[in-house]
Image (cartoon, rainbow, N blue to C red):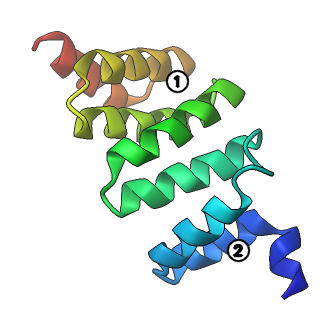
């Protein structure tokens, strides 16, 4: 039991793998204040909320993770999806632009960027 308190990210990932989403939310919330400056922890928490179709609650976690790590393409991709789910076209477009700056050959981000720009 002591191990999961020393390795909260590992425990959160295990809960996600096991489909224990409510437990992941509760566990993450209980550790949030201690790990609020950990980009990986915030990314995982955002992912938990996104998985349970709560894009609105996922967004602040992805925003915080982005503040801490602006060059993570996987994070930007999920952040794009959250903005799309919330019908925030301009914010999704900004994410796509950033992804294509970091990975010019990212076909998915290029296509989505073009689609969003033509709307």
Compute the Cα span from label 2 to label 1: 31 Å
Q: Residue drawn at (68%, 52%), measured in percent from left and top?
A: 41
Query: Which residue is identified by label 2?
Result: 11
Left/right placement of residue 114 relative to residue 119 reads: right
Disc 1 secondary structure class:
loop
Q: Residue drawn at (65%, 25%), measured in percent from left and top?
A: 67
* Residue 69 visible from this viewpoint: no
Query: Tag 1 or tag 2, which sits nearer the N-term?
Result: 2
Camera-nearest residue between 33 and 115: 33
Total labels drawn: 2
Furthest toward the top, the residue is 117
Left/right placement of residue 8 relative to residue 3 reads: left
Q: Residue drawn at (35%, 39%), measured in percent from left and top?
A: 82
Left/right placement of residue 15 relative to residue 3 reads: left
- The C terminus appears in which quarter of the rendering? top left
Camera-nearest residue between 92 and 33: 33
The answer to which quarter of the image holds residue 61 is: top right
Q: Residue drawn at (71%, 29%), measured in percent from left and top?
A: 68
Camera-near label (2 vs 1) is: 2
Q: What percent of the width, then of the height, locates residue 8?
A: 76, 67
Furthest toward the left, the residue is 119
- The N terminus appears in which quarter of the rendering? bottom right
Q: What percent of the width, then of the height, locates residue 62?
A: 53, 38
Q: What percent of the width, then of the height, locates residue 114?
A: 22, 16
Left/right placement of residue 57 relative to residue 90 reads: right
Q: Residues within 10 Å of mark 2 (few under 14, many from 20)?
A: some
Q: What percent of the width, then of the height, locates residue 44?
A: 59, 55
Check the image and report above or below for 39 versus 63. Answer: below
Check the image and report above or below for 75 versus 17. Answer: above
Q: Which mark is residue 103?
A: 1
């Amino acid at each position: 039991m002591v191990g999961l308190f020393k390795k909260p990210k590992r425990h959160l990932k295990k809960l996600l793998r096991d489909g224990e989403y409510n437990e992941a939310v509760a566990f993450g919330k209980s550790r949030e204040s201690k790990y609020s400056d950990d980009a990986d922890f915030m990314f995982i928490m955002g992912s938990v909320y996104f998985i349970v179709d709560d894009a609105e609650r996922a967004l602040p976690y992805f925003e915080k993770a982005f503040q801490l790590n602006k060059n993570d393409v996987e994070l930007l991709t999920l952040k794009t999806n959250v903005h799309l789910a919330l019908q925030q076209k301009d914010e999704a477009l900004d994410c796509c632009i950033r992804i294509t700056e970091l990975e010019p050959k990212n076909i998915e981000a290029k296509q989505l960027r073009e689609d969003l720009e033509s709307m």
